[in-house]
Image (cartoon, rainbow, N blue to C red):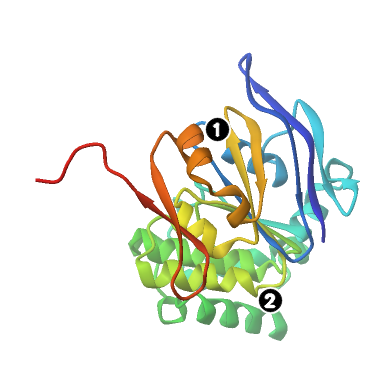
Amino acid sequence: MDLRLDGLSVRIDGSEIVRSLSLDVPRGRVVGLVGPNGSGKSTALRCVYRALRPSAGAVRLDGDDIASLSLRQSARVVAALTQESGTDLDFTVEEVVALGRAPHLRGNQALGARERELCREAMERMDVAHLARRGVLGLSGGERQRVLVARALVQEPRVLVLDEPTNHLDVRHQIRLLSLLRGIGPTVLVVLHDLNLASAACDRLGVLSEGRLVASGTPEEVLTPGLVKNVFGVDAEIVPHPLTGDPQLLYTLDSPRH
């Protein structure tokens, strides 16, 4: 499913957080949003999973305004992992993952054999199957993050929206998750702060600064020393990864090493 942010603007308390943002996320591709803190990345994502209504513009799925869908209909199509995801109730891991099937079920309809298998597969993929009977409140931040990704996968979305999904994850699980995104199937829009991870995981990048899209293209096209300096305020040398060829940033520290 093609996703398009079509002239998206968001104004909150008199401040324009996102300004006329237009960005295409082609079917089955992984597109990353990068930019400094406060540049509007998470706000744009919130419009995609309908936690916010844009002040202007639209989010389009295969050309249709997502606002034309009911919340249940859009929940069957778009799954989201947000920075605020969590629960105050001590559900078990398998119960939390099973919640991903809620948009597809009616009332208190029990999970069928297919739903249970989907949950098992998602937990295996995210390395949390061994935690299935554990309460989520007793998990580490990284374990809980992986549970929430499994819940999103169980939703069988056609569009997957991830806001800083590598938060709390150790290096092994960061790599595992970002590798999964490459072959997962749905269209993926992901916010990442780590530019090297974004370069490795994403087919294309959109760079936001003060709510505006200032660059978009492949990581090779976007990640230049000039852009990194202008947008992020740091000096960096761009070198190809010795194994993959993906651009990697080597940052220069301001103070000399002693």
- Whether residue 72 is visible to the viewer of this picture, yes or no, is yes
Residue depicted at x 49% and y 67%: 147
**What is the three-letter code of the residue carrying label 2?**
Leu
x%, y% of residue 227? 53, 39
The quadrant where residue 258 appears = top left
x%, y% of residue 175? 45, 70
Determine the residue located farthest toward the top in the rendered image. Answer: 14
Disc 1 residue crowd, few under 14, some 14–19, many 20+, Cα 10 Å: many
In the image, which disc is placed on residue 182? none
- Whether residue 80 is visible to the viewer of this picture, yes or no, is no
In this rendered view, identify the residue nearer to me: 110 or 145. Answer: 145
175 left or right of 6? left
Q: For mark 2, what is the residue?
A: 111
Q: In this view, does 38 lie above or below 252?
A: above
Q: In this view, does 103 lie above or below 21?
A: below
Helix, strand or loop at label 2? It is loop
Residue depicted at x 36% and y 58%: 141
Could you give the CA–CA distance between mark 1 and mark 2, rounded to whole angstroms?
41 Å
Q: For mark 1, what is the residue?
A: 39
Please state, as top left, top right, bottom left or bottom right, where the N terminus lies in the image: bottom right
Helix, strand or loop at label 1? It is loop
Disc 2 residue crowd, few under 14, some 14–19, many 20+, Cα 10 Å: some
